[in-house]
Structures are given as C-alpha cells and as structure tokens.
Amino acid sequence: MNLWQAFKMAFKSIALKKTRSFLTMLGIIIGVASVVIMVSVMQGQAKKNLEYFEKMGENKINLYLYAWDGGESIQRVMDYCLSLNQYISGITPNAEINDTVTIQYGAKTIKTNDWDNINWDVPGVDPWSTMLHVYLGSEQYGVCNNYKLANGREMSYLEVEKTLPVCMLGAGAKEQLFGFTDPVGETITLNGDPFQVVGWYKKMDLVQMDNTIVIPHTFNRTMNNNYDMNQYVIKARDAQSTVKAMTLLTAYLNGMFPKDADGNRMNGNYDLGSDNSAAENQQKANLMQSLVMGAIAGISLLVGGIGIMNIMLVTVTERTREIGIRKAIGAERSSIITQFLIEAAVICSIGGLIGIGIGYVGTMIAGKLMSDVFEGIILMPEPFIAFGAFAFSVVLGVIFGMYPAIKASGLQPVVALRAD
Amino acid sequence: MLIEIQNLYKIYNEGKESEVRALDGVSLQIDKGEFVAIVGQSGSGKSTMMNVLGCLDIPTYGEYHLDGTDIGSLSDKQLARIRNREIGFIFQGYNLIQELDALENVTLPLIYRGVSVFDREDMAMEALAKVGMDDRAHHRPSEMSGGQQQRVAIARAIATAPPIIMADEPTGALDSKTGKHVLEILRDLYRGGTTILLITHDDGIAATARRVVRLSDGKIISDKQQEVDWE
C-alpha cells in the first residue's frame, strides 16, 4: 500500500467519523488557542512595562550633586565626566525653573507652574497633560534625554557658555505655541525676555518630556534666582559603559565627599543612579510573570492534551476491531500504523490551525478589551509561540492517535477481532 | 499437500488451573481442490482450528506447512502477505468495516495487495457480480440485510482470487434460504478449483462437503469422505 492510499484512507476515516474527529480537534483547538492568547497578552504587558524605559532612554545615569563650596566642586565633577568620554557621550544639568515663567508668542500667553490659577474642574481637560515646563540644560540636553531632533539644531556649546538667549522646544510645547507651523527661527519671550527657537524635538509620547522648553543652564543666575543646580543627567555609551562610568564616578565622588568619623559626608553629598537597574528590575518582574503565565499556559495545553488522549483511548476498542479486520484481509502492520499516523496528524493539524486562528482573533479581541492598559500597543501573537503550541498539540495527538494502532496491530488478528 | 499440520496444540493459560486445550495434538492434511467441512460442538476447537490454519492465530506447539512453507518461521509481514494472497476469510459476523460501502470493503484487500487503482475497482465489481451484489455496490453494511452483508464478505474473500477460502459458520446468522444461497456460492468456487474449508456445528451443512472432519475437545474423532448429491 502506498502513501497516497494511506492518505486517502485516513481522510475517509476522518470524514466518516465526524463526531470523533471533531471531539479530538476540540481538545487541540482549546489548547492551542488558550496558549496563544495568554502568552500574547503576557508579552504585550511585558512590552508595555518596558516601553517607559525605552522612551526615557537607556544607559542614562542620574546624578544628584550638592557641594558646600557651590560651583567649584561641581565644575570639577563636570570636567571629570568629560574626561570619561570613552564611556560617556553627554552630560547636562537637568533643572526645572520652579517659579512661574510667563511664555509668550504672538498673542499666546502661557504660564508655567501657575498653581493658583489652574482650573482643575474643566471636564475632559487634564491640566497635567498641558502644563509646560522650562528646563535649564546644556547643549547635550537632547542627547542625554534621548530626544530626537524634529527640525533645526541643538543649542551650541558657545551659546550655553555665553548665555545667549536660545531655546529648544519639546513637541508638546511646540504644538501649544506654534500649532502646525515650524518654530525654528521664531522668537518667544520668557518673562519678557526674547529667546530664539533654534530647534524642536520629535514627540516622545511622554507628556512630561514633550511639554518642555529648554534654555541654556547659564540662565540659572538671571532666571532661577541662582538656585543650586543639583540634578544632572549623564548619558553613557552603552550598558557596559554605564556600569563602568558609575563605578568610576562613585570612586571619584567618594574621594571628593569623604565620610567623617560619624559616617556623614563632608564637603557636600551626592546620589548616583541609573534607569538601567530599574529596567532590569522590571525585566525580572516580567520574567516572573512569564513563568507564571507559562505555567498556566502549560496547564491548559495539558488539559487539551488529556482531552485528546481521552477521545483517542475511548475509541481504541472500536478501532481494534477494525484493525483486526484489516489484518485478516492482509494489511501489514506498517500499513495500519501509517494510516493511523496520517489520520492523527491530519486531525491534529486541522485542529491546531483552527486553534491558531482562534488564538489570533482572541488575542485581538483581548487587545481591544484591554486597550486602556495596552494603549499604543497592538497585541499580536508571536509566530514562534503559535508554532510551538501547534507542534506540541500535534505531537501529543499523534502519539495518542497512534497508540491504538501500535497496540492493536501487534496483536494476532484473531485477538484484535475479538475486541468488543 | 496444500495444508499439512502435525501435532498441533493451542493451549490457553498453559500450566494454570484454568488451562484450556483448544487444539490437543491435531494432525491433518488437506489437498488442493478439496471441500472440507470441519464439524464439532461449540468449544470443540473448530474455530481455533480455522484461526490457526488461516494464520490469524499462532499455535502453541506443532508444525504447520502451507503449500510447503513452514508458517512458524514466517515474519509478521510475510504472514500478512499469506492472509492477503493465499486465503480468503468468511466470518460468521461478516466483519465488514461499517463506515465503508460494499465496493470499498471489497476493494480493501486489493489495496493491501498493491493492485493498481485502474484495475482494482473492476476486480472488486467482478467479485461483487459473482455473488450477485453488484447492484448494491454503494450501500453501506448497515443498509443491507444479513445475507447481503455475507455475500459482500464473500466477495471480499474472493476478490484477490485466493486458492483457499475459509468460512467460519458462514450461514450461522442467516435464515435457511439465504444460507443455501451462500453455500451455493461456495460450491461454485469449489467447482472452479478453490480449496474450501467450511467450519460449522450444523451436520446438515456439513453434509454438503466432500470430506467431513469431526472435532471434539480439540481432537479429531473422525475424518471421512462422503458422496454429495449436488455434484
């Protein structure tokens, strides 16, 4: 008997025993679909959790620095950082002007941090999402904070050094002041002083970072009452450099601010941290979650598998008789096993494909239902997962589908014929 | 000799208290073209005899030569070939596959034999025509009477034109009229040169055979040739 015959026999058998075929498929459909949906939702969530860190920019070191002698020590730290340029690609102060700043362009006037006059009760308007912030930064502010230029250029070193009135706009600030027109070259006023817009950044989808206006930090003296600037952002070249730079900086700063006998730091204080460690924690949390979801998915596959097994085993007796007949009229063992193998594989494959289809649709429905949680992320099952669940079910189905064939075809025909 | 068995034993639960000797040292020779009835009460071992002779079962002890071949030395695969090419079976319970129609059931042994697609349908139809069932080729077993099912089963047995036909109580489940018809078909096959082995408990049916072998408690108690009126 050739393979084509075996195929034809298998298909005939599937078509003739519809209930049995369907019940077998059902186990696989449920198993595959549930695994695909669960794993996809889980992966979507993990992706969402990491999204924040991706946008904020990886390999970013946050430095808090406070020195008794003011600028002198800080300048030394800055210089030290610049000397680490094999690990560090940029450094910038990151200080918000906390007093109210009046921003004007043409007829538009917007005030920052104007807490007394914010109307919290306008329905549908979240004051947080429209509030602008003015930051003091260096020419490397964009690089350090992972901004991408939309148009124009960054501030220059000389402009910062010489306290020239230039500014950068985040996408949100640009939209509020200029709408859809290009702001490059235009002049806005901050507290009445003119600042020329030299460039603006692409949308980050993080409200806090988009509603930003950056001016040279050298304006600290005139616009920020010469408050201490304590916050700095350092951008390392990669993850390894982050670790290296943090180690070197820690050693340098420990030397600069030694501890006295009581364990208190002298000359000032510092704090060093990187988002990488936060991202790593998140990744760990995601891994935990993956393991839990994986276990649940595994159990649902197992349940599906048991369903397949049951229906296959229930039909053993019926099939044993059939195998007895086939053997009595001259079927070889290999022909019978081939037929059953193909039959099981075909049933399981059809069931698996339907399961994947339902899994994809189910995933999209889940994504829609949970669109609040997954804003901006479209849930899509990974082909690898779908294929894995599919392969598992097919293997399981084939094993249990072949079980009666292997068992019964090894019997003497008369024994198989006697089964009932 | 076509069939030659020497000191054949089939023992169930050997050595235990419940030991059953279905065949207890049987020796028998059957020549080509014979029409032999194996007769006995139920439990006499006649069905076991057919199963062993038909290579559906293996004996516990003893030798079995079929057309000079030692059956005991054959592999599973070779036994399947013998069942397919040398022997046609007719069972009391028909043993048709319920999901397949008459033609498909008859085609099955031809498929296992490797007959080409183009020939086997013709061969199967021919076999069905021989038993007068060609007009029911596309009926399922459940849509046929017992006699019709048995005729389909006979068609399946003769489709590969085997030299031996073994029939285990072929008329057992049929009324006497259809039973006669089935026996008629067997006689026709005999006239065509096929060796027929008919297993029955019914002396009336055994009377149609040229040679009657009587079994009791797994042993042959008589073996005689007889004249038959239909010749």
Image (spheres, grey):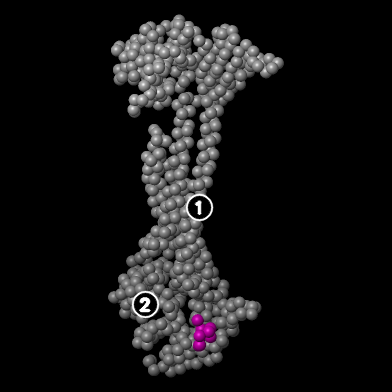
Amino acid type of disc 2? Gln
Q: Is residue A270 visible?
A: yes
Identify the element where label 2 is drawn: helix
- Image mark for residue B149: 2
Residue A338 higher or lower than A221, as above or below:
below
Question: In the rendered image, which quarter contains the C terminus of chain B?
Answer: bottom left
Q: Is residue B210 magenta?
A: no
- Residue depicted at 53% across the width and 14% down the height: A230
State the predominant SS element of the stretch in magenta: loop
Q: Chain of mark 2?
A: B
Work out whether disc 1 and disc 2 sit on a shared chain. Answer: no
Element at label 1: helix
User: In the rendered picture of this protein, how many numbered marks are placed on residues?
Assistant: 2
Foreground mark, 1 or 2? 1
Residue shown at the point (37%, 45%) measured from the top left? A361
Residue A40 spot, x, y in % from top left: 44, 41
Residue under the image location 55 percent in, 75 percent down = B58
Residue B176 location (% of width, % of height) = 37, 87
- Which quadrant of the structure image shows residue A268? top right
- Between A130 and B18, the one lying in front of the other is A130
Q: Is residue A121 above or below residue A389?
A: above
Q: Which residue is mark 1?
A: A302
The stretch in magenta equals B40-47
Question: Label 1 marks which chain's residue?
Answer: A
Q: Nearer the viewer, residue A280 or A328?
A: A280
Residue B135, position as x, y percentages in the image: 29, 75
Give the quarter of the image for residue A133.
Answer: top left
Quick one: which residue is furthest to the top in this view? A162
Determine the image quadrant of residue A382.
Answer: top left
Looking at the picture, how far across and down is residue B220, in whole percent? 55, 88
Q: Is residue B43 magenta?
A: yes
